[in-house]
Image (cartoon, coloured by chain):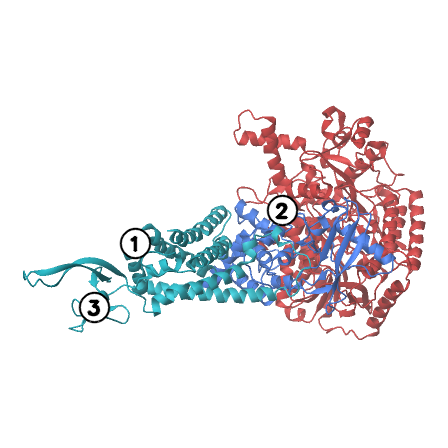
Chain colours: A cyan, B red, C blue
Amino acid sequence: MALTGLFLCLFLVGHLLGNLQLIFITGEEGKVAFNEYAYFMTHNPAVKVLSYLTYFSILFHAIDGLMLTIQNKKARPTNYAMNKPNTNSSTPARYMAILGTVVLVFICTHMVNFWAKMHFTNMPLHTITKSIEAPVGQDPTTGQPVVKELEVDYVYTTNGQYQESKVSLAEMNYSEEKYEIKKGTMLYDKTSGLKVAEGLKDLHSQVMTFFGQDIKGLPSNSNALLYVILYVLSMAVLGFHLWHGFSSAFQTLGLRSKKYVGAISMAGKLFAVIIPAAFAIIPILIYLA
Amino acid sequence: MSVLDSKIPEGPIDRKWSDYKNKIRLVNPANKRNIDVIVVGTGLAGGSAAASLAELGYNVKAFCFQDSPRRAHSIAAQGGINAAKNYQGDGDSVFRLFYDTVKGGDYRSREANVHRLAEVSASIIDQCVAQGVPFARDYGGLLDNRSFGGVLVSRTFYAKGQTGQQLLLGAYSAMSRQIGKGKIRMYTRHEMQELVVVDGKARGIIARNSVNGELERHSAHAVVIASGGYGNVFFLSTNAMGSNVSANWKIHKKGAQFANPCFTQIHPTCIPVSGENQSKLTLMSESLRNDGRIWVPKNIEDVEAIKQGTKKPTDLTEDERDYYLERRYPSFGNLVPRDVASRAAKERCDAGYGVNATGEAVYLDFAAAIERYGKEQAHVQHVESPTAEDIYKLGKGVVEGKYGNLFQMYYKITDDNPYETPMKIYPAVHYTMGGVWVDYNLMSTIPGCYVAGEANFSDHGANRLGASALMQGLADGYFVLPYTIGDYLADDIRTGAIPTDTTEFDEAENAVRSHLERLIDVQGTKSVDYFHKRLGKVMWNNVGMARNEKDLNSAILEIQNIRNEFYSNVRIPGKIDELNPELEKAGRVADFLELGELMAIDALSRNESCGGHFREESQTPEGEAQRKDDEYGYVASWEYSGNPSEPKLHKEDLVFENIKLVQRSYK
Amino acid sequence: MKLNLKIWRQNGPQDKGEMKTYPIDGVDGDMSFLEMMDMLNNQLVESGESPVAFDHDCREGICGMCSLYINGEAHGPDRGVTTCQLHMRKFNDGDTIYIEPWRAKAFPVIKDLVVDRSSFDRIMNSGGFVSVNTSGNTVDANSIPIPKDDADKAFEAATCIGCGACVASCKNASAMLFVSAKVSQLSLLPQGKVEAKERVLNMVQTMDDEGFGNCTNTGACEVECPKGISLENIARMNREYLKGALTK
C-alpha cells in the first residue's frame, strides 16, 4: 500500500504539472503545448512504462486496500455499543477505505472522460483556421489571377507544423483534396498515398468543452458546472485521503523516526492540501474563463 | 525435639555453596526428559524456575491464576534489585551484601542461605542483561546504580521505577522461549487447590480451571510453589488483588511447616488510605527516599491548620517542620530500613501529627531535592546567576527524569501535584518475610515440595531490605532451585510418569470439591469482601506495625469469630463449574481466615521486637525495638495439627558464625 | 454521585450477550473505577444477582490485567492510565457510563467483561525473547556498553504491560503496537540484535495467524496506550520487518 501510494503521489505531481499548462499557457500556444504534452504522454516509450506502472499501482492499491479492509472488518466481529474513535484518531485516517473508493470512482469516470477518449476514439484533431490569399481563378479581362482571402483550416502535426487540412479546402471548391486522414490522426497524401504527417488529437478542446461554458469555437456543454463541482469535490476527497495517506506511507515503510516525524507529517499535510487544490483550481478557472 | 533439618552444608561460609554444588547429584539429560516438575506461580521465582528447569530438560507444567504468566505481582516491584557487583567502587562486596542483608533482617535469617544469595546476586544481573532487560545506564553506556534504605553503598540496579516489571518480563521471555519449544506447558487462569502427596512425597496438584471451573489433576515428580506472599490477609496492602496464600496454605495443611508467619513488612512510603471503599494501597517506591525528605509539622497547631485547609504544607518554614527521621537517625536519615521508617511514621501519627483527615499521613517532600538538582544543573549548563524559577525548572527536570512515572502515578491517584506540594505517605503492608519453612535446598518439610521466592521464609529474617526481594526471587529460580531439585530428582529417573488415577488423586480432588461445595452452599447474606475487610481491620489494628499481648489475644478470638461467621453467612453466587470470581475470592479468604490466626499466635509467642515485628512489651527506653537473641534467636516453624487454632511450634535455632549479633542501630 | 451503568453481560463464550443497565448511588470521586465496580458487585451479590465478571489484579497500573472499554475508550477517558488507575472524579453526577469488553476476534469474550488475551502470549512464544540460556554463565553485564539513548528507548518500549488497549482501540483490532514494542526493545539492544530478523518475521506471522487486523497507522493505539508506547516502535518494526523479509 505504502509503495504504490507514494508512487501515486509522484504520479499526481507529474499529472498536475501537465494539467497546469491548461491555465498557465494561453491561446494557441497553450493548446499546442497541452496537445503535444498529451501526445508525448501517449507515445513516449518511457512514459508508457510509467503509465503501466501507474495502472498497476492503482489496481494494486485498490485491491490490496479492499482486501485489508475485509481482513480488518473480520478482526472485530462485534462492534462497540459506544465508541469514541474521534478522541484518539483523525477522521480521514479512519475512513481511508471509503475515501479511497470515492477516489477510485473518480479515477474511473475521469479516465472514461479523457483517457479513454484520448486512447481509443477518433477525437477531432488539433486544427487552426488561418486566412490565406488563394488564387481562385483568372480575371478574364486582365488575365491576372484572382486572389481571395480564404479561411483555411490547418492540422497541427506532431512535427510541429501546420498542415492544410482537407475539410475546409474541399468546401472551398478550390482544389481537390490534397490529404486524407486515416486511423484518426494520420495525414496521407491523396495523390501519392504516402503518409505525410500525423495530427495531434485535440485533448485541449476536449477539456475546455468539458469544463468550460460556451467557449468560442467549441460546442456548448450544459453540464459543465456539474462536472466542475464533481471534480472539485473529488479533489477534496483526494485531499483527505492524502492527509492521512502521505505520512502513513512513511510510517509503513519504517521511514518515520522521532527526529523526522514532524517534518513528514507537515509535508504530508501540505501535500494533501496543495496538490488537490491545484488540481481543483484548473476546471474552476476554465469554467470562469 | 525438632524435626527441622536445615541441611546447611559444612565448611566455611564462602565455600558452602560452591562445594555443595560440586557434590550434589546430577540427572543426565536423557533422564530429565522423563521427569515432570510442576511450578505454581509465574512471578520472578516461579517464572525463572520454570524457565531454568525447562532449559535443563525437565518437562515443566507452570500454573498461574492470571490470564498470562506476565502478570504476576513481581511486576509491580518498583525500586530495584541488589547485586554485589561493586561497579561503583564504593566498597561493596559479597560479604557486605551478605552482612547488610542479615543485619537488615535483624538477625532472624539463616546465614548460609543469605550468603548464597549474595554470591549469586552478580550472576542475576549478567543473566538479565543477556536477556535484554533494559536496566538504567549512564552516559558511558554502563549500568547505573542507586542506593536503597538500610545500606551505605550503591548496589541497586534499576529500570526507572519499573524494575520488577522489567525483570519479570525477562523471566517471562525466558519462559516464552520454553513454551514455544514445548518444554513448558503453561496453564493460565488455573489455581492450585490441593497438593497430592503419594507415599509421603509431593506428586502432583489439583488445580481449578477458572474459565470453566473444572478440577484438573496434574502429576509430577516434584512440585515447586512460588506463589508469593500473603500480605492480602490485611485486605488493604500493596499486593495485587489476587495475591493469596492458598497454595502455601494447602501445602501447610498437608504437612509443610509455616515459618515466622508474623514477620510482615509494612512499607513506609505508600499512598494513604482515602476511604472505606478502597480496595488496595499503592506503593511509592522506596527509591523516593533517596531524594525526598520526610516530615510532619513541629507544632500541633499547624497540623490542625493544615487539616482545616487554612494552611498549606508549603507555607511552613524550615524550623516549623520536624524532619523526624533525620532528627532521630542522623547517620541514615531518610534512608533507614523500612521497619524503622514505618514505625517512626506511626509514632508521629499516633502522637497526633498526621497531616490528612484520618491523621494517618506524613509528608515526603521533594522541594529540597528539586532545588539541589536545579543548582547542580544550572552549574552544569553554565546558567549565569539563575533565578529561583530557573532552578526550579532545571531541578524539576532532573526529578522528573528519575521519578517521573511515580510522580504521575501519585498525581493520578490523589489529584495532588507532587512537584508543587509534598506527597502524603503512610506505611502499608507490603511484603511477608515469613512463609513456608524450607531447608537449604528450598525443600519444605514435605519431600519433593519446594518453595521459592516470597512464598518461603528463608532469606530476609524479620525485615527485608529494599531491592532484595527481586534478588531473592530470581536467585531461587535461576540459580538455586535448578541445582538443588536435581539432587532430589536423581532418585526419580526410573519412576516413570506419575499416574493420576490413583486413590491419592481421588481423595485430593474430592476434598477440593467438597470444600468448594461447602463454600457455595452457605448462601448467606454477606459478600466475601465483607469478611475479608473485617479480617483485614483486625489484622491491621492488632497484628500490624505494633503488637501487644492483649491485642493479639483478642485478635485470635475475633478471627475465630469471623471465620465461623464466614462459613455460616457468606454468599457466593453462581456455580462451581463456571468462571466465578466470587468463588475464587472465597477460597482465598477462607485460607486467610486461618492464616491470620496463625500470624497472631506466632506474634504472641515471639515476645521480642525484631524487624517488622514490634512487640510493645519489648522496647528500649528510647522506644526502639529490643531484640532478645537468647530467648528468640530461632525460626518459629509451625506445624498444622488439624485445627487452625492449635498449631504446633518447632524451632530451628539460628547459628551466627560469621556475623556478630548487635542491636541494630541506624543512628 | 449517582451513575447509570450500561454493562455488557454475557454468560459464556457461546452466549449472545447484551448491554444491561445498572443504576448505582453513593459513588465517591476518590474511588477508582474498579472500586466502583467492586461496590456494584457487592450490591449485586447481596441482592442475590450475579456479579459482573471483570479482569483485574495489581490495581496499580502495571500488571495489565484490567481491560475495560469505558464510554467508548479503552481504559476510559483519562490518558496514561489503566482502568484500575482511572478515578471516578473523571465523571460527573448523573453520567451514563458504557462498560464493554475489549472487542477483537483475537480476544474472544469468556464472560461478561473478561476476554481471552492468550493470543498475546502466543505471539511472545514465537519470538519475544533473546535465546540465551538461564545458566548465568553469560558475559559480565558491563562488558557490552549500550548507548544510554538506545537503552532508554529500549526501556520505553519494554514498559508495555500487554493489556491490549491498543487492539481494543484500533479500528482494525491490530496488535502492531504490542508486537512492535517487544520487537523494538530487543532490536535496540545488542543482545537482541543477533536474532532480530527471525524474531520480527516469526512474531508478525503469529500475529497475523491469530486474526488481528492490519495497521493503517491511525495512531489510536498510541493515544490510548496507558504506558504511552510510541508509534515510532511500529515504524521501527516495519523497518526491521522489511530488512528481515528482504535479506533472509
Residue B577 image position (x, y, % from top left): 81, 68
Residue B72 visible in the current orientation: yes
C-beta proximity under 8 Å, tags 2 and 1? no
Question: Same chain for marks 2 and 1?
Answer: no
Is disc 2 surrounded by few (<14), some (14 to 19) or many (20+) residues within 10 Å? many
The x, y position of residue C187, in whole percent, is 53, 55
Q: Is residue B106 visible?
A: no
Write down the chain letter for disc 3: A
Which percent across, then down, holds residue B138? 56, 42
Q: Which mark is residue B52?
A: none
Question: Residue B159: which disc?
Answer: 2
- Circle 1 chain: A
User: Could you tell me which secondary element the residue under label 1 belongs to?
Assistant: helix
Q: Residues within 10 Å of mark 3 (few under 14, many from 20)?
A: few
The amino acid pointed to by label 3 is Ala
**A72 to B455, vertically: above or below:** below
Residue B517 is drawn in which quadrant?
bottom right
Q: Which residue is disc 1 drawn over?
A: A30
- Front residue of B336/A92: it is A92
User: In the rendered structure, which amino acid carries the disc numbered 1?
Assistant: Gly
Q: Which mark's residue is nearer the viewer, 2 or 1?
A: 1
What is the CA distance from the residue labelled 1 to the residue labelled 3? Answer: 28 Å
Q: Which residue is mark 3?
A: A170
Give the residue type that dot 2 points to: Ala
